[in-house]
Image: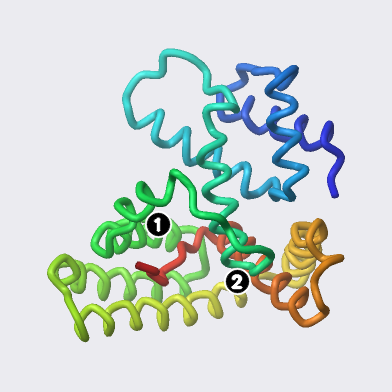
Amino acid sequence: MIDPAEYCRSVESYLCRKNEGHLIRIVGPVFEQVSGWAAQGIPLAVAYRGIDQYCERYYAKGQRRRPVRVEFCEADVLSLFDDWRRAVGVGTAQPDAHDDVREKRDSLPAHIDRVIARLTGTRATVSAGFGARLEAVVRELDAARADARHARGDTRAALVARLSALDRELLQLARQELDETKTSALTIAAAADIAPFAARMPADARAQATEAAFERLLRDAIGLPTLTHEP
């Protein structure tokens, strides 16, 4: 497990960059709060995404009035950690106060809109072949988006199944974007993310969790969103 002081320094440095160089020290009660993230086994990548998520909402409100403080980001960090645990299978996330917000935010039409926006940004940063496939998926989802709002029953189930199939296809193509060095680095990082939970997991479960963690890191590295939609 990462040393709590090192973990806090890493979060502090990341927040400083998000605040355009304005340093917010992680000391006192805030140090204990962020150390708690390390104690829970929250990967730094998840903590960074939580900070990003809060900052995106904060910046969208208009001109900033003050630097972002890390304690404001905790709800996002913990919510994303719940998602991460569900994805990699290292523990059952408990229902929390964010569930109702997440459910409203993750309606099928809104989910498709966010996927389209992410894929549109990603296609300019990947190989030509992968970019062309992403463009085709964007066109397909754009055409399906109008029907998603009123889709019910079998029609909705078919659309959700199609999203899952596209997710598996794009994730496989994303693997081909990595060279050997990058693949090795992500594999090591995935093992490190799982390490706090590995001792109490059987070998097959640990292998599955590490593979799932690798896929999460791969998505981050490529900029590939999760297309699968879970009601």
Taking the spot 27% from the left edge, 79% from the top edge, the residue there is: 159
Residue type, mark 2 in image: Glu
Left or right: residue 170 versus residue 9 is: left
Residue type, mark 1 in image: Arg
Taking the spot 27% from the left edge, 57% from the top edge, the residue there is: 110
Residue farthest along the top direction in this orientation: 65
Question: Residue 172, located in which quarter of the rendered image?
Answer: bottom right
Q: Please tell me which residue lies in front, 17 or 203.
A: 203
Estimate the x, y position of residue 119 in percent, counting from the top left: 39, 62
Residue highlighted by disc 2: 177
Left or right: residue 147 versus residue 94 is: left
Q: Where 229 sits versus 64, above or below?
A: below
For mark 2, give the secondary structure. loop
Q: Callout 1: 10 Å neighbours few (<14), some, many (20+)?
A: some
Q: Where 92 sits versus 10, above or below?
A: below
Q: Where 70 sits versus 38, above or below?
A: above
Estimate the x, y position of residue 227 in percent, counting from the top left: 41, 69
Kindly report which numbered mark, 1 or 2, lies closer to the viewer in this rendering. 1
Which of the marked residues, 1 or 2, is nearer the chain's N terminus?
1
Taking the spot 51% from the left edge, 58% from the top edge, the residue there is: 223
Quadrant that contains the C terminus? bottom left
Question: Residue 59, located in which quarter of the rendered image?
Answer: top left
Q: Callout 2: 10 Å neighbours few (<14), some, many (20+)?
A: some
Residue highlighted by disc 1: 118
Q: Please tell me which residue lies in front, 210 or 202.
A: 202
